[in-house]
Image (spheres, rainbow, N blue to C red):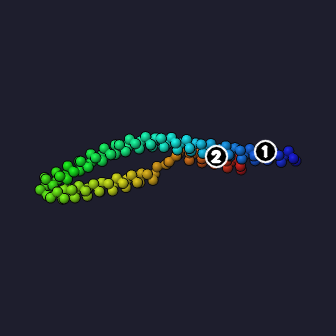
Amino acid sequence: MATYDSSIAEDIKRAFRDAQALITGEIALAQAEAREEARKVGAGAALLAVGAFCGVMSLVLLLTTIALGLSEALAWPLWAGFGIVTVLTLIAAGVLAYVGWSRLGRERHMARTVDSFKESMKWMRARTS
């Protein structure tokens, strides 16, 4: 009877060690994946920032040209041309913000870690049952 009890105790200890190793591995995977994603995002963000700055400066100059051209071509005061361009720009900004916001909600972040964690939880449940 004593060997049976020690065998159960050893199985329980082994199950806890396995679960601990599994959780440690999951945490390491999550950290590695987060570092990898952060590195990619950091490099992309720097390029995006420079591109965005250049794009914004170009857009400001283009919109100024359009506003001045509207005022001149239609013989309107300057404020009217700038007002029309401002309203159209605000409408475009609203549409782009809405589309961008809706796409952010659908994106899955850290997919491998989440999938691996779910698989590990199934394995632990099956092993303890």
Q: Is residue 82 left or right of residue 116?
A: left
Indicate the amino acid at tag 1.
Glu
Q: How many marks?
A: 2
Task: Indicate the position of residue 76 as horizontal and vertical percent values.
Answer: 14, 58
Task: Indicate the position of residue 106 as horizontal and vertical percent values.
Answer: 46, 51
Local packing at callout 2 (Cα closer than 10 Å; few below 14, some 14-19, many 20+) is some
Label pair 1/2, CB-CB below 8 angstroms = no
Residue 37 disc label = none
**Residue placed most toward the observer, 78 or 112:** 78
Task: Indicate the position of residue 31 as horizontal and vertical percent values.
Answer: 56, 44
Q: Residue at x 22, y 58 (%)?
A: 83
Q: Residue at x 37, y 43 (%)?
A: 48
Dot 1 corresponds to which residue?
A: 10
Q: Secondary structure at mark 1?
A: helix
Q: Secondary structure at mark 2?
A: helix
Indicate the amino acid at tag 2.
Ile
Local packing at callout 1 (Cα closer than 10 Å; few below 14, some 14-19, many 20+) is few
Disc 1/disc 2 C-alpha distance (Å): 20 Å
Q: Residue at x 67, y 47 (%)?
A: 124
Dot 2 corresponds to which residue?
A: 23
Task: Indicate the position of residue 24 as horizontal and vertical percent values.
Answer: 64, 44
